[in-house]
Image: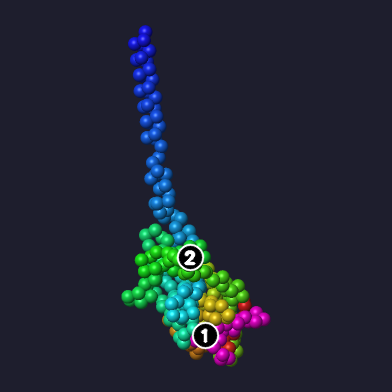
Amino acid sequence: MKTKIYLLSLLFLAFNCKDKTETKDASPSPELQNSSETVPDSAHNSRNAVDYNGTYEGILPCADCEGIKTTVTLLEDGTFSRTIQYLGKENEGTTNEGKFTWNDEGSVITLTTSPNETQMYKVGENILFHLDKEGNRIEGDLAERYTLKKASGNEAIENKKWVLFELLGKEINTEDTPKQAFMLFNSEQSKVSGNNSCNSFSGSYELKGNGQIALGNIATTKMACPNMEIAASFNDVLNKIDNYTVKDGVLHLNKSKMATLAKFKLQ
């Protein structure tokens, strides 16, 4: 009898140990449990899930000046423009334009600012983190200053169709032009587009505050029209303007302190 009880006890212990072993093996390992933190989710990275296109501004720390005013505009087509200005020094600033690329994780972009120079930024929601040469976040007491925040834009000028009615002080009659001359500033894409009275044009734009504006990478179609004078003057104005005002429903495009170069009304 004692022998039977002993054998039954051994069988019970063996079965119980086997059950615990199988239960333990069925549980995910710590590595698998944390896999969501270590394996990039290609469907929810900054490139796919963040509205990154737009204009970002900030003043970065500077060793021998008051700060480096930096403005970066990112477009959906993979192009960028970056302007840097050393505050407290006599300079007009430097502007670079080109293509930017994403890293494999879709979280960091690299701007090629010259053939031998690049700058990396980690992309967040409405923010860019200025990274060091190795692509790491800058730490220390000044870490918070190495950021560029997305500009909010200006509803008074953006996402509206502006029709040209005065150019270089002369009234423009749309009936006398082959096509309607107009401009539209798309805030979602930071893109300006329109027609110069003959050819379509498009490019990037940047609102810098205090009524300052910069247009870049303006490209036009090459169709010939009977009267190209207005189109040529319009193109020249696009290359000159650096500030704007909106008053009484009229958009004024200006160059420094000169008289208004072009006036537009809403359609």
The reply to whether residue 175 is visible in this rendering is no
Q: Quadrant of residue 121?
A: bottom left
Q: Give the number of callouts.
A: 2
State yes or no: residue 233 in magenta: no
x%, y% of residue 41?
42, 53
Q: Residue furthest top?
A: 1
The magenta region covers: 238-259
Q: Pick the residue in front: 216 or 249.
A: 216
Q: Are marks 2 and 1 in contact (CB under 8 Å)?
A: no
Tell me the mark number nearer the camera, choosing from 2 and 1: 2
Compared across the picture, whether 71 is left or right of 154 comes to left
Q: Which mark is residue 241?
A: 1
* Sequence-earlier tag: 2 or 1: 2
- Amino acid type for the residue under numbered disc 2: Tyr
Residue furthest to the front in view is 141
Q: Closest to the observer: 92 or 53?
A: 92
Question: In terms of image quadrants, where is residue 181?
Answer: bottom right
- Mark number, residue 52: 2
Residue drawn 33% across the image and 76% down it: 115
Across and down, in percent, residue 2 comes to 36, 10
Name the residue at 40% across, 43% down. 30
